[in-house]
Image (cartoon, grey):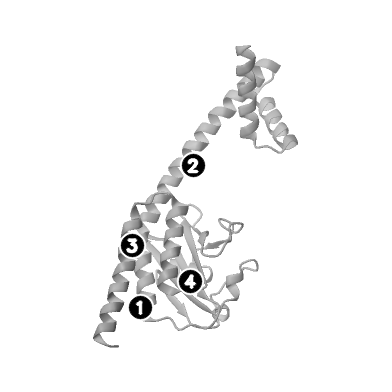
Amino acid sequence: MKKEDKVSELKKELSFLYKITQDLHKLEISELLQEIVKIADQVTRADSCLIYVLDQEKNELVLRASKNPHSHLLKKIKMKMGEGITGWVAKEKKPVAIGSGASKDTRFKYFRNLPEDKFEAFLSVPVLNKKGVCGVINVQHKKAHKHTATEINLLSAIGKLAGTAVENALLIEESLSLRETLEMRKVLDKAKGILMKNNRINENEAYRRLRQESMNSRKSIGEIAEAIILAERMKLGA
């Protein structure tokens, strides 16, 4: 490679890495992961990019982002630590590059509803932070593809640079989820209180009625609870 080409390649690498650092401020996890997908796609020009995030409680990797539209599979495809090539990469904290015949690798785990599992080439790198691994980035090519050292090194660097951002975004997601759970519990308790008072029933019976109405109306139990509270307010205001 000529000196000019090396300089051009280095500039390209630095621009990708700079973009990663600029995107670290993004807080919402799905938005952050999609940005990482876009950058990984720019680096590798692959036909697929999948990002798995580690659920530390269950010690399993969960599919959270994809280049191709797989909204019905997000959060549903999961692998235990050490399971499949993805799980191996997470456990060993090392990249894996397979130029062809990826599905023949003894570590490969096949998912029938994931079209990418039929692709030939597979490159997988860990997403790392100070505490360890927090996810895995997989890029795949439909046809055989020789992964260059630049591709592997850049994608590995992305995995390292993105780790802290992913960890922070997950903490925020967990905090918001907990807040929503607490708010919903307050709504349910209030609705149960109204039912108990108006129908002179105990708490268990009040909850049973909420759940039954939810099933009958095909609405969430939260929607039923909010409707009961609204109806009570309107009655008191009349």
Disc 1: CA contacts within 10 A as few (<14), some (14-19) or many (>=20): some
Q: Amino acid at mark 2?
A: Ser
Q: How far is disc 1 from disc 4 in space, using C-alphas?
A: 14 Å
Callout 2: helix, strand or loop? Answer: helix
Q: Which mark is residue 139?
A: 4
Identify the residue under disc 2: 177
Residue 41 position in % (x across, y down): 45, 69
Which is more N-terminal, label 3 or label 1? 3
Question: Is label 4 or label 3 in front?
Answer: 3
Mark nearer the viewer, 1 or 2: 1
Q: Closest to the observer: 153 or 202?
A: 153
Mark 4 is surrounded, within 10 Å at the Cα level, by few (under 14), some (14 to 19) or many (20 or more) other residues, namely many
Q: Which residue is drawn at the image coordinates 35% and 72% (left, top)?
A: 154
Other residues around mark 2 within 10 Å, as few (<14) / some (14–19) / many (≥20): few
Distance between mark 4 and mark 3 Cα atoms: 19 Å
Residue 189 falls in image quadrant: top right
